[in-house]
Image (cartoon, rainbow, N blue to C red):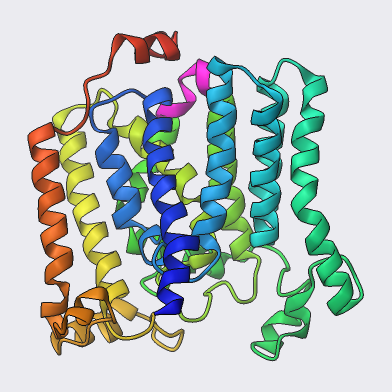
Amino acid sequence: MALTFVTFLTVAIPSAILGVLLYRTLGLLCPDRWNLAVTLAYGLGTAAFPYANALYGHQVAASLLFGAFYLLLRGKTQGFGVARLACTGLLLGYAVITEYPTALIAVAIVVYALLVVPQRTRLGWLVLGGVLPLIPMALYNYAIFGTPVPVGYKYSVLYTVEHSAGIISLTYPKLDALLGITLSPFRGLFFLSPVLLLAVPGFLQFWRKLAWRPEWGVALFSAVSFLLFNASSSMWWGGFTVGPRYVVPMLPFMSLGLAFFLAGGSMWRRAIFGALAMLSVAMVWAQTIAGQSFPEAMFKNPLLEVSLPYLARGDIARNLGMVLLLRQWYSLLPLVAILLLLALALWVRGPGEKVSSRARSRVGVWEHN
C-alpha cells in the first residue's frame, strides 16, 4: 500500500498534470476541436499509460521536460519574468537528475529559450534554476562513487555485459536496435502504438506553420534524438517493459504531430486516427493489465506470447478493484465504470471546445502560414 501511495504522488499526479499541459499546449499551437482526442490517445494509447502507474522515472522526466517547454511557450504571450525562467531551469535540471538521457531534450529547450526570450540577460536565471538540482546529485555521486558524474550503472550487478559495452552501454545507433524500438512486435513503438505513425505526416504539417518553427524544432529533435540514443544502447530493449520504455520522455513532444495531422483535416483523417487510436489503446492496455509484471525480454512477441494468454485465463495485474474483493476480470469493473462516465461526459460535451476568438488571437498568423 505504501508503494501505491508513493507512486500515486510522485508519478501518477505529475502524469495527470502532463495531460493537462499537453492539451493546453495543443490549444496554443494548433487550435482544433479534436485536441482532447489527441491528448487521450497519448495518455491511454502509448507507453505513457503503463509508466504513469509504475514507480519509474520515465513519466516524471516527461512531465518535467514538457512543463519547462510549456512555461516558455506561454511566456511568448505572458512575458518572461524571473520566476518563469528560474522555474523553467529548475524543471530542466530536475529532469536531468531524474534520467540523464533527458539532457538531450533539455539542451533543445535551452536553445529554444535562446530563440524566444528577448531579454537575453535574464537567461542567467534559467541557468541558475537548472544548476540547483545538479548540485545535490553531484555531491551524492561524489560521496558514493568518488566522482560528481553519474556512473551508477558502472557498478550495477545486473546486466554487467551490456553495461560494460562502450560508455555505460552506449556506442552508436544500430539498425537492428532502431528497428527493434520502432517496428518490431518485441519492443516496437509503432507496433505498440500505431497511432503515433500519424505524427510523421503531422510533423510535415507542423513544419509549414512558420510561426511555430522553433516549437517544431524542439518536438522533432526530442523524438529523433531519443530514438537514436536508445538505438545506441546495447540494452535498448529495457528488460521487463511495455514497449521501448527509454523513449517515454519524448512521447508528449512526438504527440504534437498528431494534432497537426488532424487539424482542419477531412473525415477520412479522423477515421484513420480514431481506428489507430483505439487499436493503440487495446495494444497498450493488453500488455499493461495482463499478468503481475511487465513482459520479460525472453518473449519476442509479448502480445501473443504473454499478454493474450494471461488475459484469456483471467490473470489480471493487481489493482484497486481487488481491494474491493473483486477478482480476475471483475476487478476491472470500477475502472470500466469510471471510463464509461468519462466517455458519457465527453459525448455530452462534444469532441472538444470550439476554438474561441481569444485563442485564435494568441496564435496570430497560424492559419495564414
User: What residue lies at 92% left-to-right and 75% top-to-bottom?
Assistant: 146
What is the chief secondary structure element of the magenta stretch? helix
Q: Quadrant of the C terminus?
A: top left
In the image, is residue 20 above or below residue 78?
Answer: below
Q: Where in the figure is residue 316, as x and y percent of width and height? A: 23, 82
The question of residue 307 being in magenta is answered with no
Q: Is residue 182 visible?
A: no
User: What residue lies at 9% left-to-right and 39% top-to-bottom?
Assistant: 347
Q: Quadrant of residue 83?
A: top right
User: What residue lies at 75% left-to-right and 76% top-to-bottom?
Assistant: 152
Q: Nearer the viewer, residue 148 or 26?
A: 148
The question of residue 207 being in magenta is answered with yes
Task: Give the tally of numbered discs.
Answer: 0
User: What residue lies at 64% left-to-right and 59% top-to-bottom?
Assistant: 229
Q: Where in the figure is residue 120, as x and y percent of width and height? A: 79, 20
Q: Nearer the viewer, residue 325 or 31?
A: 325
Start-end of magenta stretch: 205-212
Q: From the viewer's perspective, tell me whether residue 3 is left or right of residue 68.
A: left
Q: Nearer the viewer, residue 240 or 361?
A: 361
Q: From the viewer's perspective, tell me whether residue 133 is left or right of residue 278.
A: right
Q: Where in the figure is residue 305, as x and y percent of width and height? A: 28, 86
